Image (spheres, helix red, strand yellow):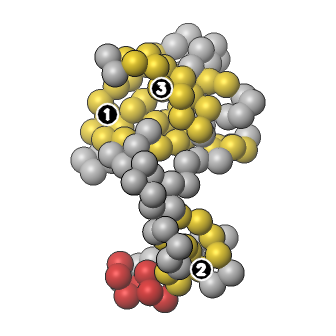
Amino acid sequence: MAVGFVDEQRVVVGSHSGLDIIDAPSGTMVVRISEVAGSCEWCSETPPSATWLDLEGVHTVPLAGLWGGSPLDSTADGWRCGRSATGVGLAPGDEVTREQLKLLFGAGLHAVS
């Protein structure tokens, strides 16, 4: 099982049974690429990534999952996200702490370690 970000709107989820492209805002599966169990024709191990062809062309997306890897940490327009000593860093050069995120998103936000 592995996941990655196609862009700000789509998430790719890969498993032993195939590859799904999901519209993040709605949670709707927009593409399903089935495969013979275990063939993993869409996956590359070094570095962990998914590659597929659709009407937009060939896509290769970094993945993170049970066996490692790293998802994208930035967007085409320059926004970045990453861990920092004080919490989570967002945006070009700006750092947002866990406390600030809780103010923005509510007390339901839990730290990931």
**Amino acid type of disc 1?**
Met
Instruction: Please identify the residue farthest to the left as the structure is shown.
Output: 26
Q: Please say if 102 is above or below 2.
A: below
The residue at which mark 3 appears reads as 59
Instruction: Please identify the residue farthest to the top as the structure is shown.
Output: 36
**Amino acid type of disc 3?**
His
Q: Using the numbered discs, state the Cα–Cα distance from disc 3 to disc 2 in whole angstroms.
A: 32 Å
Left or right: residue 62 compared with residue 33 = right
Of the image marks 2 and 1, the number of the one nearer the N terminus: 1
Q: Secondary structure at mark 2?
A: strand
Query: The N terminus lies in which quarter of the figure?
Result: top right
Query: What residue is drawn where x is 37% and y is 49%?
Result: 8
**Residue 110 seen in the current view:** no
Left or right: residue 14 compared with residue 107 = right
Q: Please say if 65 is above or below 59.
A: below
Other residues around mark 2 within 10 Å, as few (<14) / some (14–19) / many (≥20): some
Q: Residue 80, how many percent across, how many down?
A: 51, 62
Q: Are marks 2 and 1 in contact (CB under 8 Å)?
A: no
Query: What residue is drawn where x is 59% and y is 14%?
Result: 41
The residue at which mark 1 appears reads as 29
Q: Residue 32, how many percent across, how many down?
A: 38, 23
The residue at which mark 2 appears reads as 87
**Amino acid type of disc 2?**
Gly
Location of residue 21 (image quadrant):
top left
Q: Using the numbered discs, state the Cα–Cα distance from disc 2 to disc 1 in whole angstroms.
A: 32 Å
Of the image marks 3 and 2, the number of the one nearer the N terminus: 3
